[in-house]
Image: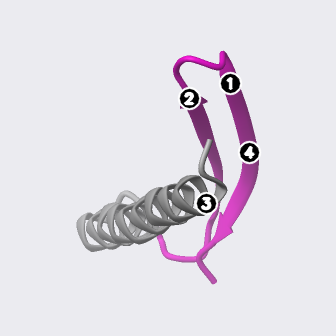
Amino acid sequence: MNEDVFNTSVRKFLKQVGVTSQREIEKAVRDAVASGRLKGSEKLPAKMVLTVGGVALSFTVDGELELG
């Protein structure tokens, strides 16, 4: 295994996940506030599940998003 290629690939994937996830979360929350489904002061539970095929990896991160 080429460690440099692997490391670059992992970093590229995680950057894509981070940027895309942030964009989707922000859009969903703004839409919910605009439609009145959220007040804008809530704390929302959040969960990210990462799976990687071929190595049977399933990793969950639980957290909270505070709106204000």
- Crowding near the residue tagged with mark 3, few <14, some 14–19, many ≥20 C-alpha atoms within 10 Å: few
Instruction: Magenta stretch: give its range.
Output: 39-68
Eye-nearest disc, 1 or 4: 1
Instruction: Please report whichever mark, 3 or 4, sits nearer to the chain's N-terminal start.
Output: 3
- Crowding near the residue tagged with mark 4, few <14, some 14–19, many ≥20 C-alpha atoms within 10 Å: few
Asked if the residues shown at circle 2 and circle 1 are in contact, with their CB atoms under 8 angstroms apart, the answer is yes
Relative side of 15 to 60, left or right = left
Asked if the residues shown at circle 3 and circle 4 are in contact, with their CB atoms under 8 angstroms apart, the answer is no
| Residue lying furthest front | 2
Q: Which residue is mark 4?
A: 61
Q: Nearer the viewer, residue 36 or 62?
A: 62
For label 2, the SS is strand
What percent of the width, then of the height, locates residue 3?
65, 55
Q: Which residue is mark 2?
A: 52
Considering the image in quadrants, where does the N terminus appear? top right
Of the numbered discs in the image, which one, if any, rests on residue 57?
1
For label 4, the SS is strand
Amino acid type of the residue that numbered disc 2 sits on in the rendered structure: Val
